[in-house]
Amino acid sequence: MSDILKYKRGNIKQAPLPQGSLSWDEFGEMQWEEIEAGAEANQPGFKVVRKLLSDKRFDK
């Protein structure tokens, strides 16, 4: 996922994540497939991160 973050605006990491979710640094070490799986499993924060990373409004 760190490769995806390179093409996103820096302030994307300032988005608040739900309580109980991983930090942005922890999400940055994951693969995109892990983010997708976490979102499908409804784990805290995964849907938010997936939405932000796939939204073209946050591209550089």
Image (spheres, rainbow, N blue to C red):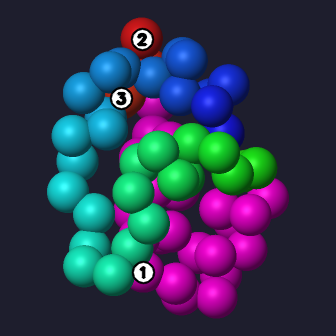
Q: In the image, what residue type sits under mark 1?
A: Pro
Q: CA distance from mark 3 to mark 2?
A: 9 Å
Q: Give residue 38's quadrant in the image.
A: bottom right
Magenta region, residue range: 33-56
Element carrying mark 3: helix
Residue 42 at x, y = what percent?
54, 87
Name the foreground residue: 28 vs 53.
Answer: 28
Q: Main secondary structure of the magenta part?
A: helix
- Quarter in which the C terminus is drawn: top left
Instruction: Please tell me whether residue 59 belongs to the stretch shown in magenta.
Output: no
Q: CA distance from mark 3 to mark 1?
A: 23 Å
Residue 34 drawn above or below residue 43: above
Residue 13 at x, y = what percent?
31, 38
Q: Is residue 11 left or right of residue 39?
A: left
Residue indicated by mark 2? 60
Name the foreground residue: 51 vs 10.
Answer: 10
Does the residue at mark 3 contact the one at mark 2 (Cβ under 8 Å)?
A: no
| Residue at x-position 68% and y-position 25% | 3
Name the foreground residue: 55 vs 28.
Answer: 28
Q: Is residue 54 visible?
A: no
Residue indicated by mark 1? 44
Does the residue at mark 3 contact the one at mark 1 (Cβ under 8 Å)?
A: no
Q: In the image, what residue type sits under mark 3?
A: Arg
Q: Give residue 10's quadrant in the image.
A: top left
Q: Give residue 59's quadrant in the image.
A: top left
Closer mark to the observer between disc 1 and disc 2: 1
Closer mark to the observer between disc 3 and disc 1: 1
Q: In the image, what residue type sits under mark 2?
A: Lys
